[in-house]
Amino acid sequence: MNNKSSKKIRVRFAPSPTGDPHLGAMRTALFNWAFAKKNNGKFILRIEDTDKKRQVEGSIENIIEGLHWLGLNYDEGPEIGGDYGPYTQSQRKSLYINAVNKLLDDGNAYMCDLSTNDLEKMKEEQKLQGKPPGYNGYSRNRPRKELEESKKNGLPIVVRLKVPLSGNIEFEDLRRGPMKFDLSKIDDFVILKADEMPTYHLASVVDDSSMNISHVLRGEEWISSTPKHLMLYKFLGLDPPSFVHLPLIFGKDKAKLSKRHGANSIIEYKESGLLPEALVNYIALLGWSPRNDKEVLKYKDIIDLFDFKGLSVSPSIFDPEKLNWLNGVHIRSLNDKDLIQIAADKLSKELKDDSDLVDKNKLSEIIPLIKERIKSIDEIYPSIEFFFKYNKPDKSIIKCGNLENSKIKNNLENLLNDFNELQERNSTSHKDIELLLRSNCEKLDLKLRDYLGLVRNCVTGSEVSPPLFESIEILGLEECISRIQDCINTL
Ligand code: GLU
C-alpha cells in the first residue's frame, strides 16, 4: 500500500456562506458523508467565509440546519469543534499569512500593486487585440522592495502566485482518470487579497492540508482550480489529497440547475413537505448509481453501495417528478408510528394546540386510511383536519345530483334518525355504516356517488376525503349527527 491509500479517510464539505444551501451543494455533502461512513473515516464541515462581501446573513445557520435535517451529521465542524479547528476560515488567518510568507520568501509568489481599475483596462485592451483577457505579469519581475514601498505608501497590494510559464500539470481524478493542464494558460492568480484575506485557492489548500484531508470530492465546476491547488501544494512542500470531481447538475432544459427549475434551496425543500430520506435518496442518484438498477435507497444502502465507479462523468438531469415519486415511496414505507408522530407534530402546529386534541390513539386509526394516498408530508394535515376541526361546507356544495334543497333536507333528516338508531343498537362499525348508506341509496333510488357525496360533504366539510365509512366510524356517530344537523340548518 502506498502512503495515500493507507491514510485515514478524512473528507470535508466546504461551503461558502453566500446564500441558502442548494441541491448541488448538499449532494456534494452527501457523497462526502457516504464515503466517510463507508470507510470508517471522518466527515468535516468547514465554512469558507473569506469573501466577506458575498456573505449572506443566516446562511451558515441554514447550511447547518440543512445538513442536520438531511441526517448528514459531521464529526468535526464550526459549532462542535474537533482536533483541527477552528473550522471557519475567517478564524484561521494566521495560517494563510504564514503560507504566503513562505511563498514570497521562496520566490514562488510576489506582491502586486496594480489597481483593480488598471487590471480592468488591461483586460479591455487585450480583448481589443483579440487576446484572452488576463493578468499579464505586470509585477512578476519587479523587485520586492519596490512593492513593499508601495505597501508602505498605502497602495492596495495583492499577492500572486508565480505560475511557471510553460509545462503541464497532471493529476489523476479518481473517477475520470488522468487529467492534464497547460500551465501557460494559467495566470499568476491572486492568493492574498488587498484586505489580507486569502483567496479560495490558498485557503482551500492550506486547510485541506492542515486538516489532514485525504480526499477532496467536489463539483466539476472546481476542476479548473485543481491545477492551481496542485501548484500551491508543490510550492508549499505539502502532500496533496486525492481528487474526485462530481458531475454537474442540469435542469431538463440542459441549463445549470438554478431557482428557475423549481425549489433549489434545501430550506425550501424542508418546508415543502418532503421527507429528508426521500431527498437524500434522490440526490444520491444525481450523478451516481449503485449499478444494480436499484432506485429506492435508504441511508444504509447509500453508505454500503457508494463508490467512485458508480459516479457518472456526464451531467445529471434534475427531474422533480422523480423526486415526488420517491417521496411517495418513502412515505408509504414509513412505519405507522413515525407517520403518527409527523401527523401529531403537524396538527399541534396547525391547530396551535398541544393538548389532547392531538389524540395519538385517534391518529393511529386515521393514518392507515391515508397512508397509501399521500405523496407529500404536506398533504397529511389537509386530509385529516376534519377529524379534529369542522369547517362547515358552503351551502353550494351541500348537494346531491339534481335534487332540490327540500329533498336533500329530507334525506338528511332521515339519515339523522338512522344514525340515532344505529347508535341505540350499538351498531357503529364502518361495516354497519356502509350497509346503512348503501341500502338508503337504493331505497331513495339515487346514484351512490351522489348520495355518498352528500354525506361526505356534510360530515367532512369537503368534497374529497379518506374512505367515508371508516371516517364516520372514527369521527363517531354523535359528532356526525351534529355536523349533519348543522348542514340542515344552513339549507
Ligand atoms: N467553498 C467552495 C464552495 O463553495 C468549496 C469548493 C471545494 O470543495 O473546494 O463550493
Image (cartoon, rainbow, N blue to C red):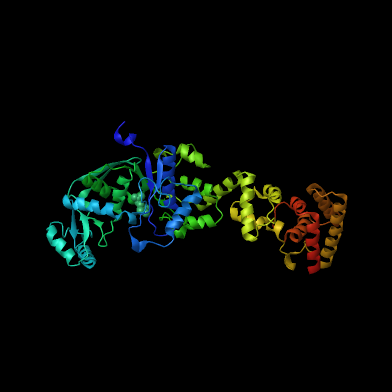
Q: Quadrant of residue 154?
A: bottom left
- Closest to the observer, 407 or 161: 161
Q: Quadrant of the C terminus?
A: bottom right
Q: Quadrant of the N terminus?
A: top left
- Residue 460 position, x and y percent, is 73, 59
Q: Residue at x 42, y 62 (%)?
A: 57
Q: Quadrant of residue 127?
A: bottom left
- Closest to the observer, 66 or 285: 66
- Closest to the observer, 385 or 50: 50
Report the label total.
Answer: 0
Q: Is residue 45 left or right of residue 351?
A: left
Q: Residue furthest top?
A: 1
Specify whether residue 463 is in view: no
Specify whether residue 451 is in view: yes
Q: Is residue 393 left or right of residue 164?
A: right
- Residue 45 position, x and y percent, is 40, 49
- Residue 141 position, x and y percent, is 12, 56
- Residue 375 position, x and y percent, is 60, 51
Q: Is residue 66 left or right of residue 346?
A: left
Q: Residue at x 52, y 42 (%)?
A: 298
Q: Quadrant of residue 389?
A: bottom right
Q: Is residue 139 left or right of residue 90?
A: left
Q: Residue at x 18, y 53 (%)?
A: 104
